[in-house]
Image (cartoon, rainbow, N blue to C red):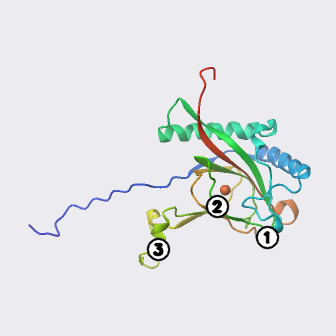
Amino acid sequence: MNVTDFQFVKRTYFPTTIFQIDVPDSKALNDKLLENIYAEQERDLKGINRSNFSELGGWHSHNELHKSPNYSDLVSLINAATAKMGDDQGYAKSHAMRIGTMWSIINPPGSANRSHVHPGCMWSGVYYIHAPEGAGNIEFVEPRTAHLMNQPRYEPKTKRAKENWTKVRFVPIPGRMFLFPSWLYHGVDPNVSKEQGRKAHRVIVSFNLNQVKISKDG
Ligand SMILES: [Fe+2]
C-alpha cells in the first residue's frame, strides 16, 4: 500500500451566513421611506449617537421607527424576509423573528460608521434606500479573530476561496436588504460621493431581531 494513496475529505463547519433579499421595483417604497426619514430628521435634528459620527454629519434616528405606521410596508417586507430565513434555518414554527428596534442612518459625504456589533439580539439587518456611487460600502469582518493572528501565505494573483476570506464588502444598492448575525462585526466606509445635496446621501434603515413566541390568538 502506498501511503500517499489516501482518501482526502474536506469538512467545513461553523460558517457565517449573510442573507440577501432584493426587492424588485423598490422605487415607490424607497421614495416613501426617504420622505418619512427626512421628515423624521427635521423633527429630531440631533438624532442619537451610535456607530455614526455626528461630528461628521452622520445622522442616526431614534430606535423605534417600526412602531410608526409610516414604516409598515418595510416592516411587512422584513417580516416576510425573516420568515423565509427562519424556514431556511429550520427555526421553530412556534416562534417568529420580530423587530425589537429599528432606526435610520443618513450619511452625507465625509461620514462613516465605526465597526460594531448589535448586542442583545439574534439577527440584524440593513435595507438600502438611497446610495449614489461612492456612498460607502459595508464591511463585515471574520468573526473568528484567532484566524487573523497568523495568516497563511496564499498563491498570489489567485482568488482566495470564500472560506478563507477575512472580510467581505458590499456596495449599497437601493432595494437590497442584508440579514446578518448580530455578533458579526461590521462598519461602513466613508461616503465619498461627488453628488450634490441629498443626492449624495447614503440612507438606510437598520433593525434588530429576536425570536419571540407567537401567541395562540395570533
Ligand atoms: Fe450595525
Amino acid type at circle 2 is His
- Element under disc 3: loop
Residue located beneath label 3 in the image: 149
- Element under disc 2: strand
Which residue is rendered at x = 77% and y = 51% of the image? Answer: 104
Mark 3 or mark 2, which is nearer the start of the sequence? 2
Mark 2 or mark 1, which is nearer the start of the sequence? 1
Measured as percent of width and height from the top left, residue 94 is found at 53, 29
Which residue is rendered at x = 55% and y = 32% of the image? Answer: 95
Task: Classify 41 as above or below 169.
Answer: above
Q: Is mark 1 within 8 Å of ligand 1?
A: no
Amino acid type at circle 3 is Met
Measured as percent of width and height from the top left, residue 163 is found at 44, 62
CA distance separating discs 2 and 3: 20 Å
Measured as percent of width and height from the top left, residue 126 is found at 67, 51
Residue located beneath label 2 in the image: 116
Which residue is rendered at x = 86% and y = 59% of the image? Answer: 198
